[in-house]
Amino acid sequence: MQYAIGIDLGGTHLRAALVDRDGNVLAHQRVLTLAQEGPDAVIGRMLALIRAMHSAHPNASICGVGIAAPGPLDPVSGVVVTTPNLPGWDNFPLRERVASALDWPVVIGNDANLAAVGEWRFGGGRGMQNLIYVTISTGIGGGIIADGKLLLGHRGLAAEIGHMVLSFEGPTSGSAPTRGSWEALASGTALARDAAAALRAGTSTLLSELATPDTVSTMYIQAAAEQGDAFAQELIEQAGRWCGVAFVTLLHLFSPEAIFIGGGVSNLGDRLLAPARKEIESRALPGYRETPLILTHLGDSIGLLGAAAYVFDECSPVASDTSA
Amino acid sequence: MQYAIGIDLGGTHLRAALVDRDGNVLAHQRVLTLAQEGPDAVIGRMLALIRAMHSAHPNASICGVGIAAPGPLDPVSGVVVTTPNLPGWDNFPLRERVASALDWPVVIGNDANLAAVGEWRFGGGRGMQNLIYVTISTGIGGGIIADGKLLLGHRGLAAEIGHMVLSFEGPTSGSAPTRGSWEALASGTALARDAAAALRAGTSTLLSELATPDTVSTMYIQAAAEQGDAFAQELIEQAGRWCGVAFVTLLHLFSPEAIFIGGGVSNLGDRLLAPARKEIESRALPGYRETPLILTHLGDSIGLLGAAAYVFDECSPVASDTSA
């Protein structure tokens, strides 16, 4: 049996796992990223975690190390372009810095892209050739498996699905200029922004008892909706309709076998997905309408598992082909 | 030198060409499709054209035959699902019917997809690994080269780019249910529909001197715009803005090196593309903004050339890799 070490470089936590080809986790460890100490310190912690994974099973044959990192990065050159939540990582040669200290090959990938690989190799997407993974959280990101391969695009910048434009007019999201984008309309940040605006405007809603404009979040909106609050229910439904419109475009562009959905906002479940399914039924062409929307079962570990799966895909393509 | 025979099965014309690996056309022939005579008669004409191409250069070594056909089809099974403009072709085993009468391998593909292959192998996209080809005509279609391969998707149904949703509200296009789709908003049919409505409503425009609600078309709208007609100019600009919004989504999803544009409506040139570029500049993320929009130089032959190029790609993958 061969093993891979997966690393998930998050803004808060740095995680590592030793994973076999079937997705079983043999060892797992998590430490604080402490990103404010800068890349050198973080790389040091990363190498310590990698060695800890190896020490846990010193006789395991390790194929390589896969690192899931946030923000745009070039998986071919191994360079992180920029990381919104980690200071000091602009144009950082992440792969080379890690690989030069190890005897194993190292691959890196965008965390949302590698989550798609995790779903594909170890989750509900096993055996598929075409799938889309969407994470709806503070922002909206994703990864695309197209014709049996992770879609990368020029300089690895494909699959920025949160920046699809769904509306000619509409808000922007954070510092991104993409007016009317999916992320600007239906992310957790967008839901909280719209709820805060309503609270400030004095809209009659249970939310005013649960939160203030500064503290309101998807969690409170969900709680209010479950207690029958019409405003909160409509807010979630509207987000669901935007998700549905985005899914229709993704179905027609990629013809996936399924769309998998993760991220904190996906905990809204059918309250979000039922209106999305309605948009698909009314707008998609006949051959695409039946494509299932599936909540991921891999939870928080999806990026970590995907990082390990990507090692198996990249370091031994023959094995990856036989599993397809 | 090796050669391929390309076939373009159109609603009006059936065309064939004998093409070398550099895209040079050694022989070319065109006949009427006469689709109303049914598939058997059309297949007979197709086989006669193929034999004529071979007879033109009987000593040429032919790799295979590529057929570009309209409408959704499955390039893996070789079955045409349905063809809007050709009666009697539903679930028609096109590849098998042609291959059984020949000694060469036969590949089939959607005409807009194969146009992308034509642009990639023989046009402005040579050497690229990622590009998008868009045809804006009566409808809007396209093809996508992603990570050095034609994107097919599940059952070959990917790249239905005219059915991207650009607006929550908005018209539908023809019999398609995709409300607010790119095709419903900015195709030649959409331009003519909006011009006809304006003429019926008595809008003051030069178009009323050039055409009636029943005859107005992109050609007349272009003529009026060139004579300074404000209504016609705004109509084209609005279509250009919709195209820009669609391009922003395509850039973020695929990270192409260029977007190539063909089809009759693309003759509007910068009148259409300048407002599209403005949307890209204002909405796209920094790494995507510089991607060029390029009018195709391959004209009407793009599908025919693409069908031949697809033969070289599919029948001898080694040669295709070296050209990448």
Image (cartoon, coloured by chain):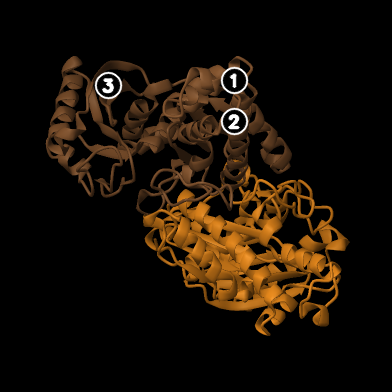
Chain colours: A brown, B orange
Both marks 3 and 1 on one chain:
yes
Per the image, label 2 sits on a secondary structure element best described as helix
Q: Is residue A34 left or right of residue A127?
A: left
Q: Are marks 2 and 3 in contact (CB under 8 Å)?
A: no
The dot on residue A18 is: 3
Residue B190 x %, y %: 73, 62
Distance Cα–Cα, label 2 vs label 1:
9 Å
Distance Cα–Cα, label 3 vs label 1:
40 Å
Distance Cα–Cα, label 2 vs label 3:
41 Å
Which amino acid type is marked by label 3?
Answer: Leu
Instruction: Output the chain of dot 3.
Output: A
Q: Is residue A143 above or below residue A264?
A: below
Quickly name the residue at label 1.
A225
Residue B242 x %, y %: 60, 59
Instruction: Output the chain of dot 2.
Output: A
Which numbered disc, 2 or 3, marks the residue that appears first in the sequence?
A: 3
Let me know if residue A139 appears in the view.
Answer: yes
Frontmost residue, B303 versus B257: B257
Frontmost residue, A159 versus B180: B180
Both marks 2 and 1 on one chain:
yes
